[in-house]
Image (cartoon, helix red, strand yellow):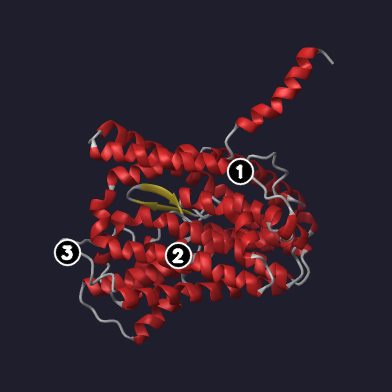
Amino acid sequence: MSSSSTEAAETAPARRGLRLPFWAQVLLGLAVGLALGFVAREGQVGWLATTLKTVGSTFVQLLQVVVVPLVLTAIIVSIANLRQVTNAARLAVQTLVWFAITALIAVTIGIVIGLVTNPGSRASITTAGAQAPAHTGSWLDFLTSIVPANVLGLTSSTSGLSFNVLQLVVLGIVIGAASLAVGEPAEPFLGVVRGALAVFQKITWWVIRLAPIGTAGLIGRAVAQYGWDLVAPLAVFTVDVYVGCAIVLFVVYPLLARAHGLSPRRFFAGAWPAIQFAFVSRSSVGTLPLTQRVVTKNLGVSEDYASFAVPIGATTKMDGCAAIYPALAAITVAQLFGIPLGLTDYLLIAFVSVVGSAATAGITGAVVMLTLTLSTLGLPLEGVGLLLAIDPILDMMRTATNVAGQALVPTIVAKRNGLIDLDVYNGAKVSSIDEERPEPALVHA
C-alpha cells in the first residue's frame, strides 16, 4: 500500500468523526432558526421572514409529497406481511386495544389539566370576529371520508386536488387483505409494491436528511410570524398542551414500559431519533420510516409485527393531536364563549378521542379532530379560528407525543407476546440515521 493510500485510510475515520451527529445538526438548526426568527421579528426584516417561511413550508411540502405513495405501499405490505406472523388477528386486536387505552389515559389527563387551570377563563382574547375554519369535521364527514372515491384517495376542492390520507389507509388495508386472500398469484404484485416502498422510503430518508435546514425554517418562521405577542393571550392554554403532552410522554409512557418489564431509559434512548424528528417535522406519517427503524433496530421488535403495527399507528395513533389537544381546546373554547360543560360532555370528549383519532390521519395539524370534537359537543366552530394562530407551536409537542406512543405500543405488545429481542432492547448500540442503513424492515418478503 502506498503512503498516500495509508494516509487517506488514516484520515477518513477522522473526517467522519468531525461530522456532527444528526441530533446535533437538528439542535443546531433549531438554535439558528430561533436566532434568525428573532432577528426577522424584532428587526422587521421582511426578506428574512419570507425566506424562513419558504424554507419551512418547502420542507413540509416535501414530506407531504412522499406521504401518499409511502402510506399506501406501507399499509399494503404491512397487511401482506401478517401471513408470516403467528396469531396475527390477536396481535392486531391487542395493538388497537392498547391504542385505545393510551388514548383514554391521555384524554383524561387533558381534561383534568383543563379543569384545574381553566385556560379559557384566563385567556386575554376576544371572541368578536372569530370565524369558523374552511375545513371542518363531523361524524358524517368522517364516515363518508373513509369510503375512497378513487384508487388514489384524491379529493377536490376550490384550492385544487388533494389526497385524503384516511382513504389511503382504507385502500391499503383492502388491497393488502385481498393480496392475502389471493395468495401465491399476488406475489408478483406484492414484489412490485415492496420495490416501490423501498424507493419511497429512500426518498423519505433523503428528505429527513434535510431536517436541520427545515428545522431552521420552521422554527424561525414560528418566531418571526407569531412571537410572544400572539402566544401571550393563550399562554395558559399553550402551557397546558405542553404540560399535558410532557406528562404523557415522560410519566405515563415510562410507567407503562416499566409495568411490562422494560427500561424507560432504554426506550427513550432507542426511540429518541424518531421523537426528535417528529417534533421538527410535525408529521407522524413523515416520520414513519424513522419510527419503523428505531422500533425494530433499537427496540428489538419483530420486523414482521412492526411492519403492521407502526404504519397503522402512524395514521391512527395520536395521543397528542387527538386526545390531549382536543380535550384542552374544547374546554378552552367553551370557557371563551361562556358555555358550561357537564359530565356527559367530558365523556363525549373521551369517546371522540378514542374512536375518532383516525380522522387526524397523521398529517400536520389537528383541525379536523378539533372540529369533530366541537361539533359533537355542540360548541361554536368559530372557536377553532381563535386557536389556529398558535397551532404550529403546539403541533411540535403534539406530534412528538404521537410518535412516542406509536413506538411504545408495538414495543409493549411485542413484549407481551414474546416478539421482542430483549438483548437488542437492553444492550445494543442505539441506531442513528447517520449510520449506513440496511434494507428497510417494511419491505422484507
SS category of the residue bearing label 1: helix
Q: Residues within 10 Å of mark 2 (few under 14, many from 20)?
A: many
The residue beneath circle 2 is: 245
Residue 138 showing in the rendered view: no
Residue at the location (57% across, 41% down)? 22
Residue 201 visible in the picture: yes
Residue mark closest to the camera, 2 vs 3 = 2
**Which residue is at 25% across, 57% downward?**
232
Q: Nearer the viewer, mark 1 or mark 2?
A: 2
In percent of width and height, residue 3 lies at 79, 13
Image side of residue 214 versus residue 119, left or right:
right
Q: Amino acid at mark 2?
A: Cys
Asked if labels 3 and 2 touch by Cβ distance under 8 angstroms, the answer is no
Q: Which residue is mark 1?
A: 200
Identify the residue at horizontal 46%, vertical 37% (top origin).
Answer: 213
Looking at the picture, which amino acid does disc 3 mark? Thr
The amino acid pointed to by label 1 is Phe
Q: Which structural element holds mark 2?
A: helix
State the residue position of label 3. 126
Q: Position of residue 189 (x, y in %)?
A: 72, 50
Observer-nearest of 356 and 420: 420
| Residue density around tag 3, few if under 14, some if 14–19, many if 20 or more, within 10 Å | few
Report the Cα–Cα distance between label 2 and label 3: 27 Å
Asked which secondary structure carries label 3, the reply is loop
| Numbered marks: total | 3
